C-alpha cells in the first residue's frame, strides 16, 4: 500500500497530491505548483528569500478551467491538438 503524499505550493498554498499532479520525485526544498512556475512566481519568491526580504503576495493571473466551473486550484496547462 503506497502512502499518498500531499504538497503545498510555497507561494499560493494550493494543495496537490503527488500521484494526481504527476510529481515523480519528492522535492527536497521548496515546492511550487505548475501555475506559479509558469508565471515565474517561484522566481519572485526565491529572490525575496535570497535577499531575506518580505515575501510578496502571489500575483499570478486569474486562471479558470475551460471545461468546468472551477475558479481556483492546481491547474495543469494542456495543449490542444492541431
Image (cartoon, rainbow, N blue to C red):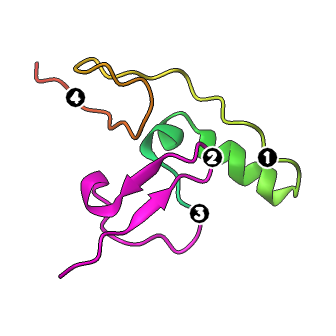
Secondary structure found at label 2:
loop
| Residue 10, magenta (yes or no) | yes
Image point 10% across, 18% down: which residue?
82
Is residue 48 left or right of 45 when viewed as pictured? right
Whether label 2 touches label 1, CB < 8 Å: yes
Q: Quadrant of residue 59?
A: top right
41 is within the stretch colored magenta: no
Residue tagged by mark 3? 30
Q: Are marks 1 and 3 in contact (CB under 8 Å)?
A: no
Q: Which mark is residue 11?
A: 2
Q: Which stretch is magenta? A: 1-30
Q: Nearest the camera: 75 or 73?
A: 73
**CA gap, disc 4 to disc 1?**
32 Å
Question: Mark 4 Cα within 10 Å, few/some/many (few <14, many 20+)?
Answer: few
Q: Residues within 10 Å of mark 2 (few under 14, many from 20)?
A: many
Q: Earlier in the sequence, mark 4 or mark 1?
A: 1
Q: CA distance from mark 3 to mark 4?
A: 27 Å
Real-space Cα separation, disc 1 to disc 3, in angstroms: 14 Å
Residue at image mark 4: 79
Amino acid at each position: 500500500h503506497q502512502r499518498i503524499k500531499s504538497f503545498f505550493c510555497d507561494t499560493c498554498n494550493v494543495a496537490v497530491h503527488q500521484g494526481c499532479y504527476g510529481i515523480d520525485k519528492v522535492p527536497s526544498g521548496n515546492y511550487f505548483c505548475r501555475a506559479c512556475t509558469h508565471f515565474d512566481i517561484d522566481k519572485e519568491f526565491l529572490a525575496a528569500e535570497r535577499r531575506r526580504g518580505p515575501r510578496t503576495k502571489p500575483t499570478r493571473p486569474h486562471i479558470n478551467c475551460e471545461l468546468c466551473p472551477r475558479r481556483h486550484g492546481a491547474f495543469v496547462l494542456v495543449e490542444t491538438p492541431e
